[in-house]
Image: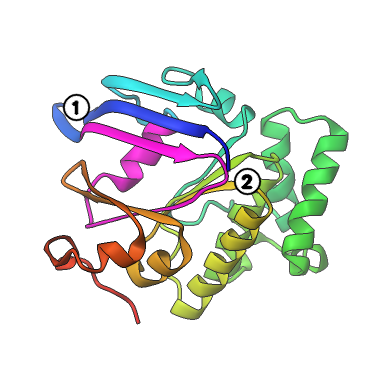
Amino acid sequence: MSGVILEATNIDVHYGRVQVLFDVSISVARGEFLALLGTNGAGKSTFLKAVSNLSPVSAGRITFDGADITTLAPDRIAARGLAHVPGGRGALPDLTVEENLRLGGHLLRRKPSDLADGLEQAMALFPWMGQRRRQLAGTLSGGEQQMLAIARALVTRPSMLMVDELSLGLAPAIVADLMGVLRQLNDDGITILVVEQHATLAMQTAERVLFMEKGQVRFSGRGEDLVDRHDLLRSVFLGA
């Protein structure tokens, strides 16, 4: 791990007149596995959207790999190697598995050779996709759709992957499998930032955790140290 790959400095985000993020500063080291925890409405998803410029910041600065991306268009941010898997399963239900995968590369205008390499990587990670490439995504299980959304992001060959609400609507065993996939990707050199409600699993998997409350970062450190912060965790359900 060497250097900082993502840095958000003193960012504010508003939805209309309502301020959602307050002077948030978060730094992510290259190769790190970081989990972002917090209560519902704490601003976790908004932070990811701010990084991707889906929710523009009203103050502050965001850099990725040394370049200022604060006002860069979302597709240009993705083209630089920062992939964002939104919450709620990002697979497009009316497209096949393969069409979903190819869409990621086509949107970023990847060269055919790069797209082929990305498809190969995705299908190596999830072998069932190669066997069911012509199946409509809408007929997949919830866990499979989440895997497909992650795989589509990987087709772009990112250096950093942000995953929002990984466990939303999924059984604990599926969530554990998905977290294992993210761990494997991190071991392969991809920086991971995951927003997760299953606090115990996230603290066990990530190298570092952040805790947000009411639009501010209240904790940054190791998961085992967060366990002792009962003032923060009282409102978060800790999964078994």
Residue 13 place in picture, x, y as percent: 25, 29
Crowd tier of the residue under label 1, counting other residues whose Cα lies within 10 Å: few below 14, some 14–19, many 20 or above: few
- Give the color scheme: rainbow, by chain, secondary structure or one colour: rainbow
Mark closest to the chain's N terminus, 2 or 1 = 1
60 displayed left or right of 138: left
Quadrant of the snapshot with the C terminus: bottom left
232 displayed left or right of 167: left
- The type of residue carrying mark 2 is Ala
The residue located at (82%, 68%) in the rendering is 131
The residue located at (62%, 27%) in the rendering is 80
The stretch of residues the image draws in magenta is: 22-51
What is the quadrant of residue 24 in the picture?
top left
- The type of residue carrying mark 1 is Gly
222 or 113: nearer the viewer: 222
Crowd tier of the residue under label 2, counting other residues whose Cα lies within 10 Å: few below 14, some 14–19, many 20 or above: many
Q: How far apart are the alpha carbons under marks 2 and 1?
A: 30 Å
Report helix, strand or loop for mark 1. Answer: loop
Q: Is residue 168 visible?
A: no
Within the magenta stretch, is there residue 133?
no
Within the magenta stretch, is there residue 31?
yes
Residue tagged 1: 16
**Which mark is in front, 2 or 1?**
2
Report helix, strand or loop for mark 2. Answer: helix
